[in-house]
Amino acid sequence: MSERAAPFFCPYCGDEDLRPSEQGHGAWECAACNRAFQLKFLGLLSRGLRRDDGGGEGI
């Protein structure tokens, strides 16, 4: 099993000064904006990744 993935940037301020939080698994703290947030993997989509190009054929 691989180690947990870490966020590279704070989703609120974009700073990189992040530390794991004591709140539990997936919880992070940003020292720059003093916010705490939690990341959670929900699962894979059954349809996979699909790109919407606007629905029209070549113009």
Image (cartoon, rainbow, N blue to C red):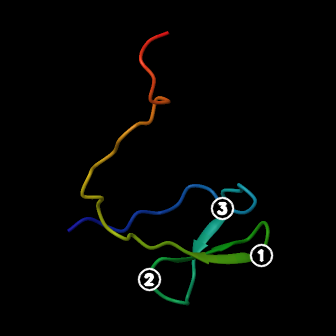
Q: In what quadrant of the picture does the N terminus appear?
A: bottom left
Q: Tell me whether the residue at label 2 lies in contact with that at label 1, contact meaning CB atoms closer than 8 angstroms.
A: no
Looking at this rendering, what residue extends furthest in the top direction?
59
Looking at this rendering, what residue extends furthest in the left direction?
1
Q: Nearer the viewer, residue 27 or 42?
A: 42
Looking at this rendering, what residue extends furthest in the right direction?
33
Residue lying at 45% horizontally and 23% vertically, measured from the top left: 56
Residue lying at 39% horizontally and 69% vertically, measured from the top left: 41
Label 2 sits on a secondary structure element that is loop
| Mark 1 neighbour class, 10 Å CA radius: few under 14, some 14 to 19, many 20 or more | few
Label 1 sits on a secondary structure element that is loop
| Mark 2 neighbour class, 10 Å CA radius: few under 14, some 14 to 19, many 20 or more | few
- Left or right, 31 with respect to 41, comes to right
- Left or right, 41 with respect to 8, comes to left
Label ID, residue 34:
1
Label 3 sits on a secondary structure element that is loop
Residue lying at 50% horizontally and 72% vertically, measured from the top left: 39
Residue 12, position as x, y percentages in the image: 72, 63
Residue 46, position as x, y percentages in the image: 24, 58
Residue lying at 44% horizontally and 83% vertically, measured from the top left: 25
Disc 2 residue type (three-letter):
His
Q: How many marks?
A: 3
Q: Which residue is mark 2?
A: 25
- Which image quadrant is residue 28 in? bottom right
Q: Gap between marks 2 and 1, in whole Å?
A: 19 Å
Q: Which residue is mark 3?
A: 10
Q: Earlier in the sequence, mark 3 or mark 1?
A: 3
Disc 3 residue type (three-letter):
Cys
Q: Nearer the viewer, residue 51 or 9?
A: 51
Q: Earlier in the sequence, mark 2 or mark 1?
A: 2
- Relative to 15, residue 36 above or below: below
